[in-house]
Image (spheres, rainbow, N blue to C red):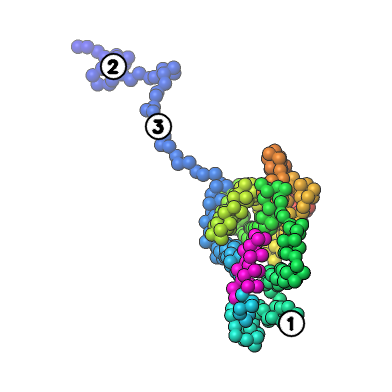
Amino acid sequence: MTTLTPETTDPTTEPTTEKPSPTMRTEAPTRHPRPQPRTPSAWRIVTAREISVKIRDRGFLLSTLATLAVILGAVGLQFYIASTTGKITVAAVAPASTQLVEQAEALADRADQDIDITLHKETSEEAVRAAVRDGDADAGLLRTPDGWTLLGDTDTDSTAATWLGAAVQANALEANATAAGTSMADLARGATLQHTLLSPDETPETVVRMATYFFGFLFYLAAVLLGVSLATSIVEEKQNRVVEIIASSIRLRDLLVGKIVGSTTLALAQMVAFTAAAAIGLVAAGHEETFGQVTAGLGWFLVYYVVGIAVLACVFAAAGAIATRTEDIQSTTTPVNAIVAVVFVAGITASGTAQSILSFAPLTSTITMPARIIAGDTAWWEPAASLLVSLAAAALVVLGAERVYRRALMQTGRKLSFRQALKLAD
């Protein structure tokens, strides 16, 4: 008989378990995490929201369509005036006046003037007067013992007076020369006036002036519309406490950047549409040469416009942040609107040395530098240098406006000034 001691264990009834060594490591199975979708930056979300809200805003759409209508209407009016200018209907008793009308057209052609004078034949002097009164003719021509009389209804047609008057004088001189035994060639010797352009390859002054007004008007209009809309949306979010909810999720700096990028993108899209409408109008009106002359300046204008509008958007955002109610918008944006007005007036009225200086000044360069480029009055480096100056000034203005915006946005107690907002702590 076998006796089992306490130290002996039966291997068949109780398996031996071995404790792991402290140096041993238990390896878990390797797991590869699923890739997480990338979340766009906060400012991009704000930008997308700003654009989506704006393009559905009735005021934004109406202002855009109204501006397009004004531009197309102005181009159409110019086309209509160009098509009707130089076309005159003259009521007269034939046949004595027929030769006079033909001579007036011939004189206009020699002077490179596109004048079309149509003779409205009448049977009597009373019929001539009736045609002018009823509007059937622009002017009336009557033979008198002392010469000729030009009739008008309420005023004198300057074109008819110029060329018919020149024809009457030429006719009289020819008759007097014949009576004096000489010729018109002898009388007119040395009386020829020729036109010579000293800079025929440069853009005409009228085109430069027209482009300057166009750039100035669009910049001023876009700045005012953008500023009021942006400042109003900011103060509404502040007044309704929506900004406090947004600030708990993203940084105020990202909120400002998103609003500025969204507003600037929409403003640029508007400007591209406006300039495209003007370009189509010029081409449709037969001014392809004029369009080619302003193309270079138009491209630079869009570049300067983006910089200037982004700066103004940031300043208008700060103006909205220091307000506490929508009623405060007018007072907080007045200084900015005044600056925009000064830029507009200075940009379209400056000339010579003053224009050259303003073409390197921030904001005014948006109007004056493209105008100088169209006029061919710039060296190759000047637009780039001016743009660098504008970018440097824009950086400083944006930093200051961003500080005002960030410090004043959460202040709801009272309306602040820009100086008071700068003194607040972050």
**Mark nearer the N terminus (1 vs 2):** 2
User: What's the CA distance linking mark 1 and mark 2?
Assistant: 157 Å
Quadrant location of the N terminus? top left
Most extreme residue toward the front, as rendered?
181
Q: Nearer the viewer, mark 1 or mark 3?
A: 1
Q: Nearer the viewer, residue 29 or 381?
A: 381
Which amino acid is tagged 1?
Pro
The residues colored magenta run 99-119
Q: Which mark, residue 32? A: 3
Q: Residue at x 66, y 47 (%)?
A: 201
Most extreme residue toward the bottom, as rendered?
126
Q: Position of residue 25 (x, y in %)?
A: 42, 21
Above or below for 382 versus 158? above
**Which residue lies under the disc numbered 2?**
9
Q: Secondary structure at mark 1?
A: loop
Q: Nearer the viewer, residue 420 or 394?
A: 394
**Which residue lies under the disc numbered 1?**
145
The residue carrying pointer 1 sits among few (fewer than 14), some (14 to 19) or many (20 or more) residues within 10 Å by Cα, namely few
Q: Quadrant of residue 243?
A: bottom right
Q: Is residue 41 magenta?
A: no
